[in-house]
Amino acid sequence: MEHPVYITNSLTRQKENFIPLNPPHVGLYVCGPTVYGPPHLGNARPYITFDVLRKYLTYLGYKVRYVRNITDVGHLESDADEGEDKIAKKARLEQLEPMEIVKLYTDLFHLAMEQLNNDKPSIEPTASGHIIEQISMIEKIIANGLAYESNGSVYFDVTQYSKQHHYGALSGKVLDDLIAGAGEEQRVLEGQEEKRNRADFALWKKAMPEHIMRWPSPWGLGFPGWHIECSAMSSKYLGETFDIHGGGMDLQFPHHEAEIAQSQGCNHVAPVKYWMHNNMITIDGKKMGKSLGNFIHLEQFFTGNHPLLTQAYAPMTIRFFMLQAHYRSTLDISNQALEAAEKANQKVMNAFGTLHKLKPSSNNTANIPDIRKQITTALNDDLNTAIALSHVFEMVRLINAAYAGIEQLSEQTIAEFTSIYHDFVFGVLGLRNDQTGDSSDVTGLMDLIIAIRTEARNKKDFATSDKIRDALAQLNIRIKDEKNGVSWIKD
RNA sequence: GGUCGCGUGGCCGAGUGGCUAGGCAGAGGUCUGCAAAACCUUGUACAGCAGUUCGAAUCUGCUCGCGACCUCCA
């Protein structure tokens, strides 16, 4: 098959032709959430980005296996906590079992994914369900001489590894700098004294008495290091080498760098052919993140319940907003920007309704572009959804212009536009038309109300007709007196 | 301090050697009882300075400003 897609590979920092290892099969792994809190806007970006990628590859005929994990093993939160992990801490604060915390936030995450219209992954493995695989991987790495046990913990020997491989290839880090530390602000990392070298990272951590999430291992009771789960689960379900690994740019180092080292150190092959990283959502130009405390939960967007938000924003507004930017750019959020996205999205959805009302002409007006080709060209070029959308808007313009009688569209073109809506607007881009779904009862009632109002208008009884329109507006139903008749939409 | 990236019209945001990105907002117009919607017209933007080039927002250098990673983070 043809392979028209180009994607930016973080490993080479270049756009590369995407050719799967075993076409038409594509293995896609995306780092999933650590379920210890409600999902926020920043969390949504990779899942929307890679949902679009998955949908597009599927549209092109690839068979995608999409694996996205759930991290339900609490990794160490900070040095000060003396080994307490994020999930255990949350459990203590809320007086719940750690697995209750995991369940609660996994459910919230799934709900948000559904609201954002992200398809479910093919496999959604949990870290806690793959302890055996992680232990076995660690054993292999030790056997290969690239990890060592120290006081019940196991560390990856970065110095040893770097004698054979380039540690830092993905992130551009230089090992000597990492060993030297981050300038004068060198931080004291937990368990530093157990390591042979500052740059070494944990594969397995001994559980302190207060650490309640713990499993037996050859090295005693403990829990897996943060990075090993992704290596274990991706290789289990996608093979030792697979096509695409995605995630946020903030995971590039140390998480993904460590993944490469572990997998290579275990299986003697590079785990991933194409690394893809989405950029950050910013607020006032600064990364939205848990550590900065400037994040807004998705649920707060959907309800508008947040001091920084002037109104609620529907899930599709959020999705549209993200798609208007390229995934490798930062995206700055503001009420103004979100409102713009809301209106733009509405315009696209409204045009779909208008499309159905068009009367086909025998011929097209001149210069109707090949929208499908333009959209695929944009998506082929590193998944440029912003450009793809600009072509959608050209289609929207043509539809509205045709309805206004300025352009003419043939039956064939109308059918193609309908197909483009299904394939791309609703399909690949995953925008859902939340205005539809009204029952035939409502439609019948609206027909009746509109008929009565039209009667009043014909009698120039504008007081009555405006009263009806205002009352409907109160119910978020907007009446539009168009040249070709009266229509209504739900806002 | 090291590494990397960014600075585009009122806002968000594509593009990256010559050809209108797009959306929102604003202005004018068409339509309309009014409104809404839609359509048409409209903005001549690329941080600053210098250089390369027939030509630069796009390449090079310098300056200023901002950010990401180097620690958990999507």
Image: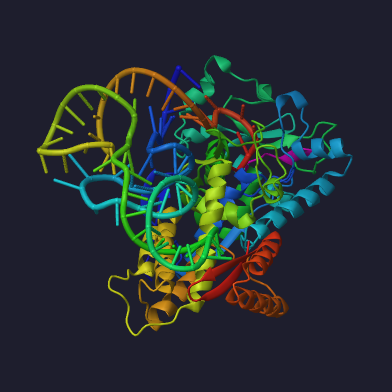
- Above or below, A245 against A307 in this view is below
Majority secondary structure in the magenta region:
loop
Q: Quadrant of the C terminus of chain A?
A: bottom right
Relative placement, left or right, of A105 versus A446 is: right
Q: Identify the image quadrant of residue B57.
A: top left
Q: Identify the image quadrant of residue B53.
A: top left
- Above or below, A355 against A347 in this view is below
Q: Quadrant of the N terminus of chain A?
A: bottom left
Relative placement, left or right, of A323 versus A307 is: left
Q: Is residue A105 visible?
A: yes
Q: Is residue A140 visible?
A: no
Residue at 86% in and 36% down: A92
Residue at 37% in and 68% down: A371
Q: Nearer the viewer, residue A250 or A383?
A: A383
Q: Nearer the viewer, residue A487 or A166?
A: A487
Residues drawn in magenta: A219-227
Relative placement, left or right, of A356 versus A67 is: left
Residue A184, position as x, y percentages in the image: 55, 14
Residue A147, position as x, y percentages in the image: 61, 36
